[in-house]
Amino acid sequence: MKRREFLSLPAASLGGVLFYTLAGEPVRIEAQTGEIKVPLRFFTTAEARVVQAACDRIFPSDQNGPGATEAGVVIYIDRQLAGPYGRDKYRYTKGPFVESVPEHGYQGKETPREIYRAGIRQLENFADLPAAERDQRLRAMEKTTFFRMLRQHTIEGMFSDPLHGGNANMIGWQLIGYPGPVMNYRDEIDKNYGQEFRRKPVSLAQIVGHPVAGWEEEKG
Amino acid sequence: MQRLKPVDVVIAGGGLVGLTLAKEITARTSLSVVVLERGQPRKLSDYAAGMDELDYALRYRMMQNLSEETATHRHSSKTSAVPIRQYGSFNPGTGVGGAAEHWGGISYRFYPENFRLASYLREKHGNRVPEGLTVQDWGVSYEEIEPYYWRAEQLIGVGGKAGNLQGKTVDGGNVFEGPRSHEYPNPPHKLSYATTRFEKAARELGYHPYPVPTATLSRTYTNPDGVTRSGCAYCGYCTRYGCMIGAKAQPTNMLMPVLAKRKNFSLRTGCSVRRIVHSGGKAEGLSYLDAAGNEILQPADIVIVASWTLNNSRLLMLSKAGEPYDPATGKGTLGKNLTHQVSQATRVFLDKPLNAFMGAGGLGIGISDFDGKEGVDHFPGVLRGGNIRLMSTGEGPISGFGAVPPGEVEQEWGSAWKKAALQWHDRVASINTEAEHLAYRQNYLDLDPTYTDKYGDPLMRMTLDWTAHERAQGAMVAQIQAQIGKAMNGRVAPPNSRLLEKYTITQYQSTHVNGGAIMGTSPEGSVVNPWLQHWKIPNVWVVGGSAFPQNGSGNPTLTILAITLRAADGMIDRYMKHPGGLA
C-alpha cells in the first residue's frame, strides 16, 4: 500500500489572517501555533510543495490581503485531482484523439491528474526558488494547458465553498465580501443601490446545518 | 428482449415536455401513460445542499454525463468532426425534470412573423436573401399559438409587463411584441441596482426597456392546476442549479405533484430509450435498457419522443424513422435546419458596487429596439436582430472574480492582477444579446461515423458554423451594447470578437440549440406536421425544440411549452378520437 503523504503547514498560515472587507482592514485572529499535517490524497509531499509555491505566485499573499497559501488552495487541488474530476470520470474520453482547431478546445487524452504530474515535472526545484525566479518560470509556461488549469484551480480554491478544502475559514469570501450561499435577499435586492452590502460569510454546511460532501468524495 | 404489457402512451424523456404531455393526457383521458427517463428522480429538498458554485455551475453536476454520451462538431461537411469532450457552448440536462430543473426561467414569446419567417422575408426582400438560407414557415400562426402561450405562461407563472395588450401598445413593456390576450399572470421582479442603471441609460437613449419575462416567480402564485409556489428570494443560485424553494418553474415542483396523484401515470427512471420500434408506418413502442441493464420493449398505441433537442433527432435517426437530410441535394428532412442562437456580450465596468451575488435567472431589463424586424434596416446585411439585456442572474464568487478593464494589467495572475481584480470586483456587469439564428442549407445533424456513446451507438454530429449574417448581427448589437454601456457611465470592454468568427464549442452561449426534426406544412420539407406528429409514422409525436424550423431571439422554453400544449390538444381532442394523420 502507498505510504501516506502529508503536507505540513504552519498553522498560523492556513487561514491565519482574516480579512474583513466589512471593516476594511486585515485582522489577524486564531493565532495558532505549531504545524498542521494535512493528509494528501493525490500529490506527494514534494509535488504539493511545488503546486503550493506556484499557486502562491498566481494569487499571492501581499498588502492587498491573503492569498492561495492561507486559503489552502493546494489542499483543494489535491482533493479535486483525487476525485472524479481528476480522473476525467465525466469527460468524454473515447478515441480517436485528434488535435483540432482552437474552437474545439482541449481534445487530449491526458486527464487533469496526468497534466499536473507532467507539469510539475517541468518545475524542478521550483519550491525553493525566490519569488521573482518562480514568476519567470511560470511566465515561460503561461500558454500551456497545465498553467491555464493551475490558474483556474487557484481561483476555484480561493473562492469555492470551504467544503472542497480551500477557502479556509472563508478567507477568500471575506476578501471579496461574498456572504456565502445565503438563501434569501427578498428584502435586500432592491435596496443598498450603489453601496456595498457585505455580511460576514457563512458556509453551505452552516446554512443547511449538516456537512455537505463535494463531488470529489464520490467513489468509483 | 423482454416484452411488457402494452400501455396506451409511452414517452421518451421525463423533462418539461414529456411530463407536461403526461399531465395533459392523464388529466383529460383515462389512458395509461408511461414516461421513461434515463436519469434519476429529484426533489426540492435535494437542492439546498446544491448551492455550491464549484460542483453545479463549474462542474455541471446536474447535466448529462458527457463520458457516456455527447455530440460531435465540425464547421463544414469538408472537415471531420471531433467530440464535445467537456461542457462548453450548451448544457443538455438529464434526470427527472431535465434541463428545466436548471434553466434560468427567462420566458419570452417569439414574434408573430417568426412563425412565418420564410413568407415574411420573401415579402420584404424578394430574392435578396443570403445564399443557402433554408428558413421555413412553421405551419402554425402566432394567432393560433397565442392561446397556448397564455396557457404556458399561467402554468409556469411568468412575471413581466405586457407591451402590447390586444393590439394596444403599453409603455414599460416590450412595445415590439405581438399582441397578448392577457397581462402576464404575475408582475415583474424587483430590480437589482445594475438593472436600474441599464434601464435608465436605455431610456435616455430613446430605447424601450422592459422587464425580462421570467418563470422565477415574483410572488407566491397558484397555477391553474392548483400548484402553489413561493416567490423568488433572489439567492442567485438559479441557472445551473435547482431552486430549493421552488420559486422557479421546475417540472419537479410544478408537474410531478400533479402527476403523483394520477393512477394512470407511471415514471420509470434509470431507463435509457434506445429505439423507436416501428414497421410499415406504425410504431409498436419503445425499446430501452432499464437500470439493471435488461433490454425491454414497451409496446404502446402512441409513442412520444420528448427528450432534449439533439437527442430527439438522434433517436429518430438511430431508429431509421425519417429520411436523413442531405445538404448536397437538399433532399430529406431528418437533421435539417440545425440552429443555435447568436450570442454577443459587452462587459461594462462601473463606478459603484453592484451586490451582483443577489439575483435570479430571469431578473433583467432588456430592449428589443434591434430585435426581430426592429431597427435592422439601418444595418446592411442584417435581416433579423436580437434582444439586448442586462441580467442579474446571481454571480458566483469563482466565476465573478478576475475581470479587469482591458489593458489594465500585463498578465492575468500575480500581485498586480490581484490588486486590480479586487478593485474592480463586483463592479462589472455584462450586457448580453441573443439574436435569431436563421437556418442554412449547410447547418445540419447526422450520425457521426466515428464516435460512439457508451452503448456503441453513433453520436449526433453537428455541422454548424456562422455566416456573414450572424457576424453582421453580432456587430450590430455590439455597437448598441457599447452605446448603452457608455450611457451607464461605464468603461466598456469590446466583446469577444472571435466568438462569431467560427462556431466555438468551448464558450457557453446558451442551451438554445434547436431544429433537426422540424415542423412544417409538407412531408417534403419537415419531419413533423404542425401538430408535431410524424408525417410518415402518425402514431409517433416528436415534441420539443427539435421542431423549430429556425430559432427566435428569445429564450425558447416558453415557445417549446406552447407548441407542446398545442400538440396535446391535437393528440387528445382529435387524434385519439380518429387516429390518423392530422394534417
Image: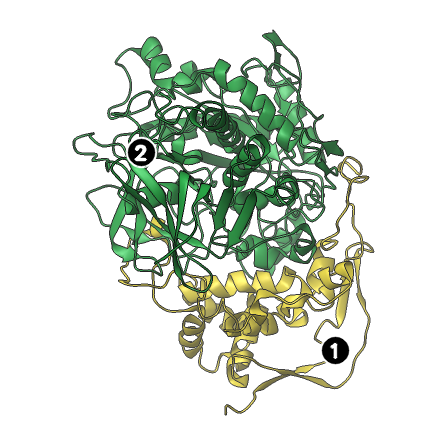
Is any part of residue A202 visible from this angle?
no
The answer to which image quadrant residue B122 occupies is: top left
Per the image, the residue denoted by label 2 is B537
Q: Which numbered disc covers residue B369?
A: none
Crowding at mark 2 (Cα within 10 Å: few <14, some 14-19, many 20+): many
Q: Is residue B421 left or right of residue B323?
A: right
**Number of numbered tags placed on the structure image:** 2
Q: Is residue B270 above or below residue B471?
A: below
Residue A180, horizontal then vertical, whole percent: 72, 55
**Disc 1 secondary structure class:** loop
Residue A55, horizontal then vertical, whole percent: 56, 69
Residue B16, horizontal then vertical, whole percent: 54, 39
In space, the residues marked 1 and 2 are separated at their CA atoms by 71 Å
In the rendered structure, which amino acid carries the disc numbered 2? Ile
Quarter holding the N terminus of chain B is bottom left
Crowding at mark 1 (Cα within 10 Å: few <14, some 14-19, many 20+): some
Quarter holding the C terminus of chain B is top left
Per the image, the residue denoted by label 1 is A12
Subunit ID for the residue under disc 2 = B
Residue located at (47% from left, 38% from top): B495
Q: Is residue B163 above or below residue B486?
A: above
Tell me which chain appears green: B
